Each structure stands twice: as C-alpha cells, then as structure tokens.
C-alpha cells in the first residue's frame, strides 16, 4: 500500500537536511518514503520531530543557523572563481575581514561590497549581514578567513580553494595505462606469514611492470582492522580509514631485525616457520597470522632504535598528530578492555579518564604508533620500487565506503558520525533485497562544522604513497542510503551531501599528491553524476558485463568512456572464468538471494552472456561454434573478452590477478557476511588449489592474457 502523504512542514524540514522524501527504484518505480523513516533519519541528525511544534522549531533553527555565527565554518570555491563571504555581526557594527593564505602566508584584506541584506532579530538582538569579496586570484589551498569587530577576538573560518579539473598524468593522457587489480592478502609468496603483505606487493608490482608492462597495481583497502581477534575479514569494514592494518607488514624487512641477538632471532624464525605453514591453505586465517606476527613485532619493538630511525619515527608521530594518538589509544584500550565494554569515561576520547588511561597504557599506545610508522615506510618502499621498475602510477589504493560502528574512527570522530542509522544500498538487480553495510554514515552538517578536516586527513593519508586512489561507491559523496536501526534496507532513504565540497577537497588532495582518482560509479546512479565527475577529471568505472547500449546489447568497446578504469570483472563478481561458468548464480541460489524463480534468473543470465559471446564472434574474437567449456575454451574466451576491452578508449585498463591464473572462486558475495567466506579465500588455480605469487609470475597463460590489453592492437 502507498504511504500516507507527509505533512508539508516535515517534508520541508527533511529537504532542508538533504533527506529524500521520495525516490525512483532500480525498476523505475516511484517510491514515497514513509514518515517513520523520515522521523528516524532526522533523529539521527539530532533533529527533534516529536510533534508539529517540534518540527516548526527545527525549521526555524535551520533558517537561523547561519545568522548565529560571524563566519561560516568553511567555504569551498573553485580556482579562478570570484566568490563572496557573508559576515554576521551586531547590526550597524563595523567589521574587518581578511584572508591568510596557506602556502605562502601573508595577509590579504578583503573588500566589502555594496549589498543590502535586511537585518534579522536573533534572540532579541538585531543581527546584520555584511558581504565581502574574495578575488579570483586566490591560489588553491586550505586558507583561513578572519573577521573582527572592534574590541573583540576575531572569528575564523576555512576557505578551501580547489582545482576546477584534475589532469591525468602526461603518460596516461598520451598512451593510456594498464595494470593489475590485486586482492593483496590473497596472493602469498613463500616468504609470507600466511597472508600477502607489502613485500609481496612490491615483488608482484615490480615484476608486472617489467614483465607485463603494467603501469599500476590497484589493491584492496589496506585500512586498519581490530588489533585483537576476531579480526574483521572484510577490507571494506575497517576500524579506521586513515590508518593501516599491520598484518601487511613484512617482519624481516624491519631494520631492527639486524640488531637481534641469537635467541630472539631464533624465536622470530620459529614464529615465521609456524606462520608460513598457513601458506598452503586455501582459507586465510587472519587471527592466526596476526597472533604470530604480533609476537615477532613486539620483540622488535623492544629493540633500541638508532638515533636516525628514532628521529624519523618521532617526525612521523608529529606529522600525524592527534589523529594517530587517538587511533593508538583506541587500539591500546581494545587490547586492555576488549572490543565492547570499556570502563566508564573512556567512551569520550577527550575525557580526563581517557587521558589517565592513555598514560597508564603508554607503552601500548607507542607500540601502535610504531606499527603505523613501519607501515608508512614499507608502503613507501613498495611504491618506490614499482615506479623504479617502470610503472607510471604505481600503487592505486582503494578507499572503503565507511567504517566499523565500534571501531577507532567511530570512537575518535564520534561527533562526525550519525547514530542509530547505518549505510547500505537500496535493492538492485544483483541484490534484490537491498543491503545493510552496518557502517555509520558521516553527518553532513557535522562535516561542515569541522571544515571537512576528518575527510581531508583520510584522503591525504590514502594518497601519500600512491599514484591513484579508487573511491568505493563514490556516489556516497553525493548521497548515501541511510537505513534506520532495526529496519530493513527497503525502509531506508537517501541523504544528500555537499558534493561540490567533498569532490573539490578530493581533487585538491589528489592534485597535491600527483594522483589519479577513480570513482566506483556502478549501481543506482543519477545520470548527471557521471557527467559531473567527468567534467572534474575524475575517472569512472566500466565493467564489461554492465556496459550495454540502449538496445540491451553489449556496448561496442569504442563507445566506452575515455575517463574510466575499464575491466572485465570486479571484486564483487567472480573471476571471469567463474562468471562464465555461472559461479555467481550458484552462490546466490545457495544463499537464497533471489526474489524470483531460479529458472528465470538463470535464463536471463545465460541470455546476457550469450549476447556477449555473440559480440566476440562478430568481432572475430571467438570462432563460430567454438566450445566455451573446458579449460582451453574458457581461456580463449577470457582472452577474447580482454582483447575486446583493449579496443576501448578507457584511460586505464585493469586485469584481475585471478584471471591471470584461471581462478574461478568469487572473493566476495555482496550482501552477505558469514554465509559465504568473503575475503577469506586465497588465490587458486582452476581446480581450486592454492597458488602462490611465484605461480602468477610463472604463468604463461597469464602473460598471454596481459598481452591482450596491448594498446597497439585494434579491432575490426
């Protein structure tokens, strides 16, 4: 039954906070959001809507909010654009406004312009609005605005000037780039401690640059996980998006190993031998791996550091500041008190109780900070080695949509996250029941009040040692699907964000890092969003199976977008050989993820794949009547699909590492957790036997497949 019409004032209030009261679903049907959902989402934004009077008061508060402070907390403008700044002061009071630039310093006085705005009565006093002009020649950067009335301390606000467009690196502009897409943890070498690490990343990356001509290595998010078991297996549900999981450290590459005495060296070798026995298992056990690696790391932490390394460590801690201290404190408390129930007072990172407990656990805090420094060093080394091997971009990191609701970011940045709601996705063709990702969303209003500093710091950290950054579900910078606590994903709604500000800050940090930005823009997307991202120089994502023309047939590769990362598959689908043999259908049937009869689903899936096979035959990439079953037929089809992709103008072409070796198993089934071993499978051969990094390097079919994306080859 349709929902009852919303009261007009509730609708107005919802829109003032960017909360959608209606939307169109994946089948094109118009949906009116229920009043219960609107009330719950507004409540998560701290808005009282208990009755009509409360709604009226909330509307008035929204209207008066800009008038209650002299300067807005932040304004984001585009380079070369002249903007104005509104300043609110007691009516008739003179005010002086100036700008201090970030990079070169210096003070620039701003000129008031003649613009009359009627004063307003706020709490019994008249407040006036003065308008000042910011010239168009202010450079990009994080600048500070000041406004001062006589005999008062100046008020401050941020002015962030961002590029109008990101430019691709010259080599990518001229020739495009190809690279590998790697679930880092799943590709282990003989030297790994049961899980792929940053040394494996460097080795695979350098080999792919020299042996395959690759320009980049896109890896899964390496965000921090829990410091104690159980460790969340999904790299897309981290405790922090700013910091890194120490499970990716290579113990033997830490300099202090050289200073160990014979006894400690033997202990580390024994731990390594125990950990390496897991390299032959097809299931990854992060908890067991970390238990052994942590023991070794604590032995090394106890070793005195030479002055040169101690100075470098201290400089890292100073640069990372309060953010690192908070993260390390959360890790220390989690080790001491568990992941759930902490002593009273520790829920507030700024409380006196927290300060006292931090001092009590100072050594544990320092241990976590040291781990983060090592990770920063080893990732920097991997990036340097890959670029020296010939890559034009090197590491491309991946930024998850959100964080664990009980994690470090949710604790240290609690004021920036909404409570009693989670992020998810509405129903779509691949998960018709919708999804709840269990992550708390950013509050748009709080991000603005914080001048987007948490977002900036997160982006800056991810780009520090990278040639690019993939933004998972980049649509979340425009709007996110909020699901009220206790409700199904079907009962959620969209909440809008200031995309101009978020995308602009993303571009500013990318320009400074010299990095490309790839937006994962799959799923339910408003059509104008892709156009907007392209105008700003941000790449989209094109997956071969999803690229279709208006007639429903596969889109000719020549019609693909130029500004995109194009690939045959993605981590949310099985490897290509698995997709061709229906692995995704078998998983979804077994897990009861279909809402329609399986016969209909299978028929549609087979019809879609046959359309793609027809396109390959038309372009001479498959022979008429060529069998697609058996390893040779599958390999020929996988190569044909990649050759087809290579004819696109896409700036970046990606090859999934599992496709190099014929792996079939899906790494992840969206919308599930323990029902399927998501993110816990090793790289495997067609018979599902575990493979190692050397097997990838030695794979002749892998070399042939990589050659299929050679940009010098053109189709008929």
Image (spheres, grey):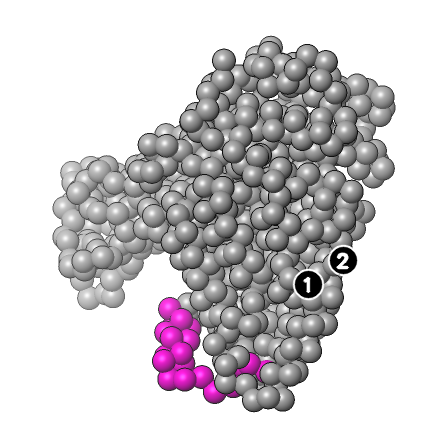
Taking the spot 46% from the left edge, 58% from the top edge, the residue there is 382
> Element under label 1?
loop
In the image, residue 457 lies at what x, y percent? 42, 57
Q: Which residue is mark 1?
A: 194
Q: Which residue is mark 2?
A: 281
- Is the residue marked by circle 2 packed among few (<14), some (14-19), or many (20+) residues within 10 Å? some
In the image, residue 653 lies at what x, y percent? 49, 34
What span is colored magenta in the figure? 299-319
**Do tag 1 and tag 2 residues touch (Cβ < 8 Å)?**
yes
User: Is residue 310 found inside the magenta-colored segment of the image?
Assistant: yes
What secondary structure is the magenta-colored segment mainly? helix
> Element under label 2?
loop
Left/right placement of residue 138 relative to residue 568 reads: left
Which quadrant, please, contains the N terminus? top right
Q: Is residue 124 visible?
A: no
In the image, residue 202 lies at what x, y percent? 50, 57
- Is the residue marked by circle 1 packed among few (<14), some (14-19), or many (20+) residues within 10 Å? many
Taking the spot 54% from the left edge, 49% from the top edge, the residue there is 219
Taking the spot 46% from the left edge, 20% from the top edge, the residue there is 714
Left/right placement of residue 467 relative to residue 433 reads: left
Quarter where residue 76 is shown: top left
- The circle on residue 345 is none
Q: Observer-nearest residue: 325 or 39?
A: 325
């Amino acid at each position: 039954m349709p929902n009852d019409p919303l009261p007009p004032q509730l609708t107005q209030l919802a829109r003032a906070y960017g909360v959608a009261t209606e939307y169109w679903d994946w089948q094109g049907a118009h949906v009116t959001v229920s009043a219960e959902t609107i009330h719950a989402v507004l409540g998560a934004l701290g808005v009282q809507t208990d009755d009509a009077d409360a709604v009226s008061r909330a509307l008035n508060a929204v209207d008066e909010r800009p008038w209650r402070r002299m300067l807005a907390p932040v304004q984001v403008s585009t380079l070369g654009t002249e903007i104005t700044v509104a300043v609110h002061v007691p009516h008739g009071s003179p005010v002086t406004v100036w700008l201090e630039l970030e990079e070169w310093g210096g003070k620039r006085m701003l000129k008031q312009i003649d613009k009359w705005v009627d004063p307003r009565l706020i709490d019994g006093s008249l407040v006036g609005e003065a308008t000042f002009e910011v010239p168009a020649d202010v450079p990009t950067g994080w600048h500070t605005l000041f406004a001062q009335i006589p005999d008062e301390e100046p008020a401050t606000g941020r002015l962030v000037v961002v590029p109008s467009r990101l430019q691709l690196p010259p080599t990518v502009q001229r020739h495009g780039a190809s690279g590998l897409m790697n679930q880092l943890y799943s590709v282990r070498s003989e030297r790994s401690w049961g899980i792929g690490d940053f040394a494996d990343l460097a080795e695979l990356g350098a080999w792919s640059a020299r042996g395959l001509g690759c320009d980049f290595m896109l890896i899964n998010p390496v965000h921090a996980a829990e410091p104690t078991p159980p460790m969340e297996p999904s790299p897309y549900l981290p405790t922090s998006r700013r910091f890194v999981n120490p499970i990716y450290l290579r113990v033997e590459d830490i300099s202090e190993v050289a200073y160990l005495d014979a006894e400690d060296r033997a202990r580390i070798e024994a731990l390594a031998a125990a950990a390496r026995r897991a390299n032959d298992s097809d299931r990854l056990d992060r908890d067991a791996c970390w238990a052994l690696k942590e023991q070794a790391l604590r032995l090394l932490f106890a070793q005195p550091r030479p002055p040169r390394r101690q100075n470098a460590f201290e400089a890292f801690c100073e640069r990372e500041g309060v953010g690192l201290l908070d993260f390390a404190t959360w890790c220390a408390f989690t080790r001491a008190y568990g992941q759930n129930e902490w002593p009273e007072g520790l829920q507030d990172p700024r409380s006196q109780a927290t300060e006292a407990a931090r001092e009590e656990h100072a050594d544990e805090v320092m241990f976590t900070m040291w781990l983060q420094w090592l990770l920063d060093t080893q990732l920097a080394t991997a990036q340097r080695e890959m670029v020296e091997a010939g890559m034009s971009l090197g590491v491309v990191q991946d930024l998850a949509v959100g964080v664990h609701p009980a994690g470090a970011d949710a604790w240290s940045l609690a004021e920036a996250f909404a409570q009693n709601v989670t992020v998810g996705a509405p129903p779509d063709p691949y998960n018709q029941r919708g999804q709840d990702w269990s992550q708390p969303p950013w509050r748009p209003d709080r991000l603005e009040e914080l001048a987007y500093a948490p977002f900036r710091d997160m982006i800056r950290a991810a780009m520090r040692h990278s040639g690019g950054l993939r933004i998972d579900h980049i649509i979340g910078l425009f709007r996110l699907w909020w699901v009220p606590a206790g409700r199904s994903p079907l009962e959620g709604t969209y909440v809008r964000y200031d995309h101009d500000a978020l995308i602009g800050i993303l571009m500013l940090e990318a320009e400074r890092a010299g990095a490309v930005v790839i937006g994962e823009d799959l799923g339910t997307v408003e059509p104008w969003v892709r156009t907007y991202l392209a105008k700003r120089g941000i790449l989209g994502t094109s997956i071969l199976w999803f690229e279709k023309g208006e007639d429903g047939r596969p889109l000719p590769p020549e019609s693909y977008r130029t500004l995109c990362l194009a690939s045959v598959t993605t981590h949310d689908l099985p490897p290509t050989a698995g997709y061709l043999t229906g692995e995704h259908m078998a998983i979804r049937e077994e897990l009861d993820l279909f809402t329609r009869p399986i016969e209909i689903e299978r028929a549609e899936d087979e019809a879609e794949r046959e359309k793609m096979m027809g396109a390959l035959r038309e372009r001479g990439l498959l022979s008429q009547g060529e069998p697609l079953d058996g390893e040779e037929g599958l390999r020929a089809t996988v190569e044909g699909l990649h050759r087809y992709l290579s004819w696109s103008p896409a700036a970046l072409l990606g090859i999934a590492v599992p496709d190099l070796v014929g792996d079939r198993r899906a790494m992840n089934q969206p919308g599930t957790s323990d029902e399927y071993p998501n993110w816990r499978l090793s790289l495997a051969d067609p018979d599902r036997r575990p493979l190692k990094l050397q097997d990838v390097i030695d794979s002749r079919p892998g070399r042939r497949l990589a050659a299929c994306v050679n940009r010098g080859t053109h189709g008929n």
